[in-house]
Image (cartoon, rainbow, N blue to C red):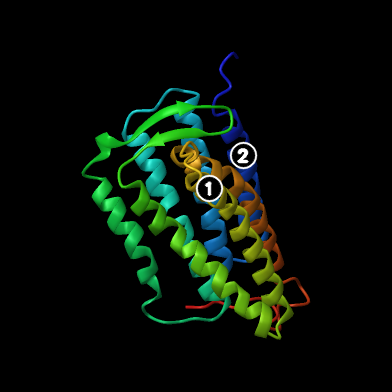
């Protein structure tokens, strides 16, 4: 095969699929674990779509739009995990999905403006409207998650909550690395990373998927824990 574009995406998607299947079979299905597995599923779908676009040539406008729809809900889901972990039960917490939902609905009227402009083995480059607004809506929940995760590290006496908080904080920092590099490059007048930042960030998010898998395993009660509350309970 002469064209290796999208192969890394396929490789990551396969690993995430295997991880997800094992988690579905062997772990407890409480609310925190379900959200974490949904996030892994989203990352797997995005990588699969990128492979289809870059390797199989299915790069018509609706494909990058679908990819953006899928990945847009990853940060609010990450923030929702933080809410569950901190036992934040406000009836308004679902509003964190509203900005992404509204932008996705707006994008549905201008799908023809989406395009895959280039592909490489590691990433894809996209053209999409309202890039600055999308970036703000996308990264704000990640920043809020990082800030909220610092609190249990300082004040919680629950070892399990502190450990999961550390893992989530690490995951959010990892997926923020391309963003930080992108802003530094923009400050120096180099905008080359911006068009491909979503794709690169999702490669970094493979580490996040592994971390989420560890969290699900850690938050699954074993035989000795089923009669106590050491694992994170359902937060409804």
- Residue displayed at 62% across by 75% down: 150
Quadrant that contains the N terminus: top right
Q: Nearer the viewer, residue 34 or 74?
A: 74
- Name the residue that disc number 2 marks: 12
Q: Residue furthest left?
A: 109
| C-alpha gap between disc 1 and disc 2 | 9 Å
- Taking 94 as reference, is 69 above or below it? above
- Residue displayed at 43% across by 23% down: 57
- Name the residue that disc number 1 marks: 43
- Residue displayed at 53% across by 55% down: 39
Estimate the x, y position of residue 5 in percent, counting from the top left: 55, 25
Q: Residues within 10 Å of mark 1 (few under 14, many from 20)?
A: many
Q: Secondary structure at mark 2?
A: helix
Mark positioned earlier in the residue sequence (1 or 2): 2
Location of residue 233 (image quadrant): bottom right
Q: Residue furthest top?
A: 2
Which of the labelled discs sits on residue 31, or is there none?
none
Q: Residue furthest right?
A: 224
Q: Nearer the viewer, residue 56 or 130?
A: 130
Tell me if label 1 and label 2 are in contact, CB under 8 Å.
yes
Estimate the x, y position of residue 40 in percent, counting from the top left: 56, 52
Q: Nearer the viewer, residue 72 or 130?
A: 130
Residue 219 seen in render: no
Is residue 104 found left or right of 53 in the rendered image?
left
């Amino acid at each position: 095969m002469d064209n290796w574009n999208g192969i890394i995406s396929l490789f990551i998607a396969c690993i995430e699929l295997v991880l997800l299947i094992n988690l579905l079979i062997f772990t407890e299905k409480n609310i925190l674990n379900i959200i974490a597995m949904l996030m892994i599923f989203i990352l797997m779908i995005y990588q699969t779509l990128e492979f289809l676009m870059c390797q199989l040539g299915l790069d018509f406008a609706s494909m990058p739009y679908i990819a953006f729809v899928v990945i847009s809900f990853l940060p609010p889901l990450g923030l929702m995990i933080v809410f569950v972990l901190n036992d934040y039960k406000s009836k308004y917490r679902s509003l964190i999905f509203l900005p992404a939902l509204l932008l996705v609905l707006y994008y549905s009227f201008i799908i023809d403006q989406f395009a895959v402009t280039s592909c490489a083995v590691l990433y894809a480059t996209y053209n999409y409207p309202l890039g600055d607004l999308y970036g703000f809506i996308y990264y704000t929940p990640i920043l809020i998650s990082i800030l909220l995760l610092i609190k249990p590290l300082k004040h919680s006496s629950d070892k399990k909550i502190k450990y999961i908080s550390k893992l989530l904080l690490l995951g959010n920092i990892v997926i923020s690395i391309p963003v930080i590099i992108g802003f530094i490059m923009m400050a120096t007048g180099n905008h080359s990373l911006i068009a491909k930042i979503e794709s690169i960030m999702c490669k970094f998010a493979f580490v996040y998927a592994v971390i989420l898998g560890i969290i699900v395993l850690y938050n699954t009660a074993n035989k000795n824990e089923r009669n106590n509350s050491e694992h994170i309970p359902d937060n409804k």
